[in-house]
């Protein structure tokens, strides 16, 4: 996080709290989340997009406190299940500021969304339109958007590229399925089509694909106007803004994104003789990711002929991202000073497979040893939210730090939590 500063003794503080003390007090592995950093990131978006609806993508990381913070900072919420939705609403999050996503929404997802009154449901398939229309109460008019595939390849990894045709998300323009969905929704008296949506991918470092997506969507808005005489008032350009995982890696420039998207909207809409739609965007990672740091204890150091393996007390159950996407992290030694020359090591987890690698070929002080603490930056997004129950080690807690005070937001998953669901013979 931004507030991390090396201190004497190799300690690092986040939000005025020493990570060493946090590790002592809360145990490891632990996620430490800098509340001010989350809030400032929300403010950066609000400032860059004062006229837009900025909704935080809860899939990156959600807990009650997080929902509270983003609401206080004036953001809405993007959820993709009845679970995320229900948790957010328990904090008093206004349902009207919530957007529901999903390529395969369950009957429960849709029913919960209607019951709680979510602001917008983003429709992702023709069959969903029929299912939604069938359960929308006769006295209701649910606002919906259509998720459109703009035919753009962008994103840090093939598994998170969602803007191209021929993948599971959204409705394509070339085969007419997006236009068909628009027509079907316009036929439904209890659904109100308020706009188009696209989410082209994740960990995107350049504004260009967003500009291209806006251009394509304006083209579709113009076609909808021409074919149906309907001017859709909103345009949602999704999330996907890149953050650095290692020093020196780029992040997406939010100010440049705002300028370029605004310019493209103004020009494109003027050309198409359309009013400029109200913009919506859905950053997840860029709000939560840099605000979190994961702290582990080293449990074993093993030197084979070629490698030095540094094994920590977590791994792929709390961070599957290296295994899934080959993401490279930069763990660092904290809590003690070392003058030992650096050594190239592989930081591995405690799980029962050789692919349980947290950081391959990274430099750590050559005297790294059991009992040391390692901090892994940029752990605020898609870590806990993607954590699993593998090997029943229990998911780590989340500790918020702010103004020198640390408090638990989500407690560690206990053996009791895990065994309670197992009803026995
Ligand atoms: N909106 C929609 C419709 C999305 O599907 C997503 C992410 C977002 C917004 C937020 O994207 P972000 O700003 O966080 O990139 N597990 C992967 C990332 C998957 C992203 C899925 N959708 C990872 O760990 O990198």
Image (spheres, rainbow, N blue to C red):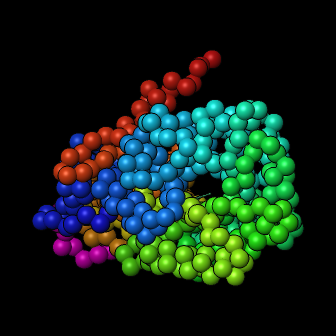
Residue occupying image coordinates x 54% and y 75%: 262
Q: Position of residue 285 (x, y in %)?
A: 48, 61
Residue occupying image coordinates x 69% and y 50%: 144
- Quadrant (top left/top right/bottom left/bottom right) for the C terminus: top right
- Quadrant (top left/top right/bottom left/bottom right) for the N terminus: bottom left
Main SS of residues in magenta: loop
Q: Is residue 151 magenta?
A: no
Residues 87 and 76: in front is 76
In the image, the segment drawn in magenta is: 336-343
Residues 345 and 111: in front is 111
* Position of 173 relative to 136 (above/below): below
Q: Position of residue 277 (x, y in %)?
A: 62, 66
Apparent side of residue 416 relative to residue 214 in the rendered image (left or right): left
Q: Position of residue 93 (x, y in %)?
A: 47, 40
Apparent side of residue 117 relative to residue 126 in the rendered image (left or right): left
Residue occupying image coordinates x 35% and y 48%: 30
Q: Position of residue 200 (x, y in %)?
A: 64, 68
Q: Is residue 339 magenta?
A: yes
Q: How many marks?
A: 0
Apparent side of residue 75 relative to residue 333 in the rendered image (left or right): right
Residues 287 and 415: in front is 287
Asked where in the image residue 191 lies, by quadrant, the reply is top right
Asked where in the image residue 85 lies, by quadrant, the reply is top right
């Amino acid at each position: 996080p931004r507030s991390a500063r090396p201190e004497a003794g190799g300690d690092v503080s986040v939000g005025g709290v020493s990570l060493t003390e946090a590790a002592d007090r809360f145990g490891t592995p632990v996620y430490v989340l800098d509340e001010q950093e989350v809030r400032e990131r929300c403010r950066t978006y609000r400032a860059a997009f004062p006229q837009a609806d900025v909704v935080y993508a809860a899939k990156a990381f959600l807990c009650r406190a997080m929902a509270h913070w983003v609401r206080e900072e004036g953001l809405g919420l993007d959820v993709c299940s009845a679970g995320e939705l229900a948790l957010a609403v328990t904090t008093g999050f206004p349902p009207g500021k919530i957007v529901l996503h999903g390529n395969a929404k369950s009957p429960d997802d849709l029913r919960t969304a209607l019951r709680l009154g979510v602001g917008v449901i983003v429709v992702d398939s023709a069959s969903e339109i029929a299912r939604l229309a069938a359960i929308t109460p006769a006295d209701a008019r649910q606002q919906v958007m259509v998720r459109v595939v703009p035919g753009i390849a962008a994103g840090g990894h093939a598994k998170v590229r969602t803007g191209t045709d021929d993948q599971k998300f959204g409705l394509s323009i070339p085969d007419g399925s997006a236009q068909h969905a628009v027509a079907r929704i316009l036929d439904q008296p209890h659904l109100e089509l308020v706009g188009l949506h696209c989410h082209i991918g994740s960990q995107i470092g350049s504004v260009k694909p967003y500009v291209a997506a806006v251009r394509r969507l304006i083209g579709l808005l113009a076609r909808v106007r021409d074919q149906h005489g309907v001017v859709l008032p909103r345009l949602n350009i999704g999330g996907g803004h890149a953050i650095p995982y290692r020093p020196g890696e780029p992040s997406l420039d939010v100010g440049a994104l705002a300028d370029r998207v605004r310019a493209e909207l103004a020009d494109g809409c003027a050309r198409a003789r359309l009013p400029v739609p109200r913009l919506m965007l859905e950053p997840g990672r860029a709000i939560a990711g840099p605000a979190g740091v994961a702290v582990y204890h080293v449990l074993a150091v093993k030197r084979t002929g070629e490698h030095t393996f540094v094994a920590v007390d977590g791994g792929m159950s709390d961070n599957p991202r290296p295994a899934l996407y080959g993401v490279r992290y930069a763990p660092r030694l904290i809590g003690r000073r070392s003058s030992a020359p650096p050594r190239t090591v592989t930081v591995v987890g405690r799980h029962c497979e050789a692919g349980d690698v947290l950081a391959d070929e990274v430099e750590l002080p050559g005297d790294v040893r059991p009992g040391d603490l390692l901090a892994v930056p940029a752990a605020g997004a898609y870590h806990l939210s993607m954590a699993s129950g593998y090997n029943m080690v229990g998911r780590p807690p989340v500790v918020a730090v702010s103004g020198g005070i640390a408090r638990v937001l989500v407690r560690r998953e206990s053996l009791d939590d895990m065994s309670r669901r197992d009803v026995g013979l």
